[in-house]
Image: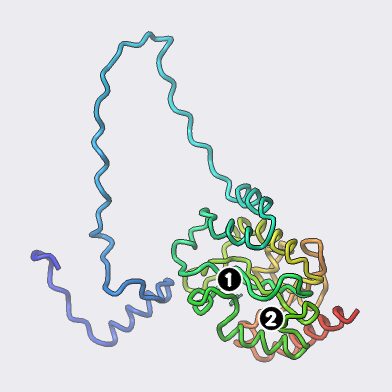
Amino acid sequence: MQADAPPLPEIDFAIARAMLEWQMELGADEAMLDAPLNRYEVREPAPAKAVAAPTVPVAADEAPLAAPPAPAIDPIAEAEALAAGAQDLAALAEAMAAFERCELKRGARNFVFADGIAGARVLILGEAPGREEDIEGRPFVGAAGHLLDRMLAAIGLSRSAPDPAAAVYITNVLPWRPPGNREPEPEEIAMFRPFIARHIELVAPDVVVLMGNPACMAALGQRGVMRLRGHWAQAFGRPALPMAHPAHLLRNPAAKREAWADLLALRARLDG
Ligand code: URA
């Protein structure tokens, strides 16, 4: 601490706890460093001093033109070009991991691409990585993921099945964890949509399951999953079934009855 810094006020347990809870509500729910860092004290490096160039008289009609403004970057157009250039899943993962237009990349620990095998008949589109997925770099490995695995097992499907007929491929709308597990913003969904479309094209599933509102937004341009659920739609050129997200089912067990009906509809579709 600096010698002239005022002494810190004493805080009791209740105040310390309230301060921590307040930070968690803002999304700061992880310790990133071993010791606290006061960002107000971190100074930007001073810009290098400009060296004056020798002046040469210029005729009025030869006056240098002002540099044109840098063209604005369109993240969606950039994502479209990167996605179209990816010829296989490895190339798509590489292109997405290198995509710099999404700020979430800077706060996340790991890039979360997918799980399961390409060629699976069913592709599950979830929302975004949570804390466990961010740590492990794999989608749906936390509590919602465990419920998802049990739901799939109930209709004879599994992400670890080697046989494409029983296999499920799992990915998310976003590959980076949003702070505090907030919902993806519309701009984030829009910039990742070209990657999602290419991802689905490369996996080539028979059906897509849209788990939760962000997946419905990305695929159908609509929210309201509990209204859309149970009705087959068309998305990315394939049959798509909106369903409640397993995290919603953990919070609202009563919704499991409808989710079971949706799983049976999925099984029936696969059985032709
Ligand atoms: N919820 C999701 O939508 N995706 C994950 O990967 C984990 C939780």
Q: Circle 1 — which element?
A: loop
Q: Distance between the residues labelled 2 and 1?
A: 17 Å
Residue 53 location (% of width, % of height): 27, 23
Residue 80 location (% of width, % of height): 66, 51
Q: Is mark 1 within 8 Å of ligand 1?
A: yes
Q: Tell me, what colour scheme is on the image?
A: rainbow
Q: Circle 2 — which element?
A: loop
User: What is the crowding at mark 2: few (fewer than 14 residues within 10 Å), some, or many (at least 20)?
Assistant: many
The residue that disc 2 covers is 159
* Above/below status of 204 relative to 24: above
Quarter where residue 190 is shown: bottom right
User: What is the crowding at mark 1: few (fewer than 14 residues within 10 Å), some, or many (at least 20)?
Assistant: many
Is 146 on the left or on the right of 268, as rendered? left
In percent of the image, x 26 and y 87: which residue is there? 13
In the image, ligand 1 is in what quadrant?
Answer: bottom right
* Above/below status of 155 relative to 98: below
* Above/below status of 64 relative to 198: above
**Which one is in front, 197 or 254?**
197
Quarter where residue 155 is shown: bottom right
Residue 28 location (% of width, % of height): 40, 72
Is 63 on the left or on the right of 183, as rendered? left
Furthest toward the left, the residue is 3
Q: What residue type is labelled 2?
A: Arg
Q: N-terminal of the two: label 2 or label 1?
A: 1
Quarter the N terminus occupies: bottom left
Quarter the C terminus occupies: bottom right
The residue that disc 1 covers is 128
